[in-house]
Amino acid sequence: MAPLSRALRAELKSEERPQPSALALICPSALTLCALCCGMSAMRAASRGEFSGALVWLGLSAIADGLDGHAARRLNAVTAFGGELDSLCDLVDFGAAPALVVYEWATQWDARRVCSNAACSQLAVCSAARGGGEAGRGVCASGLNAKTFVSDNVLWLACLLYVCCAAYRLLRFYFGA
């Protein structure tokens, strides 16, 4: 469900419409919260290195987000509260969650790429390259840094930029600009 513009909120207040039941009012918000939980589950899966699972969770989040607006309109349960809740959840589902999934994937991929090097074939050395083990400095036996391909800070800045752009886009959509 898209955020409600000022004109739509005024129109909703001025229209005479039958009051929906309590269940009808809860259903769209429950779908929105389901989408939020799917987005959060995608972040959890990515943090565990389960990237295919994270993509499934993101897909389920998008489906639930698409259904909440349709449910609200069909049940005559469009509310300002639901629109605000949807906007907040959209920032997580389409801003923060995808950014974190990509960040986790890119940093895992980078560490695996360096550790596939012949000099880093042992599990203990790979653990050190990922920042674990006794060394903990992120440097493997061959002296390669686990962050040589793309700097962790550059990846993080790209993720922050993406989330900021998503927030700005939602805000512009909210105000109809």
Image (cartoon, helix red, strand yellow):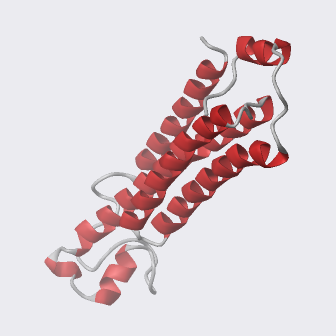
Residue 167 appears left or right of 113:
right
Residue shown at 42% from the left, 60% from the top: 56
Q: Is residue 40 above or below residue 66?
A: below
> Residue 105 appears at what percent x and percent y?
37, 60
> Residue 85 appears at what percent x and percent y?
72, 39
The C terminus lies in quadrant: top right
- Outermost residue to the left: 118
- Residue 167, by quadrant, is top right
Residue 41 appears left or right of 102:
right
Residue shown at 64% from the left, 24% from the top: 171
Count the numbered circles shown.
0
Question: Is there any visible trace of residue 153 in the rendered image?
Answer: yes
The N terminus lies in quadrant: top right
Residue shown at 35% from the left, 74% from the top: 129
Q: Nearer the viewer, residue 21 or 172?
A: 21
Q: Is residue 165 above or below residue 101?
A: above
> Residue 112 appears at what percent x and percent y?
28, 70
Q: Nearer the viewer, residue 123 or 86?
A: 86
Residue shown at 66% from the left, 27% from the top: 3
> Residue 162 appears at what percent x and percent y?
48, 37
Q: Is residue 14 above or below residue 158?
A: above
Q: Is residue 99 above or below residue 19?
A: below
Residue 140 appears left or right of 64:
left
Question: Is there any visible trace of residue 152 in the rendered image?
Answer: no
- Outermost residue to the front: 18
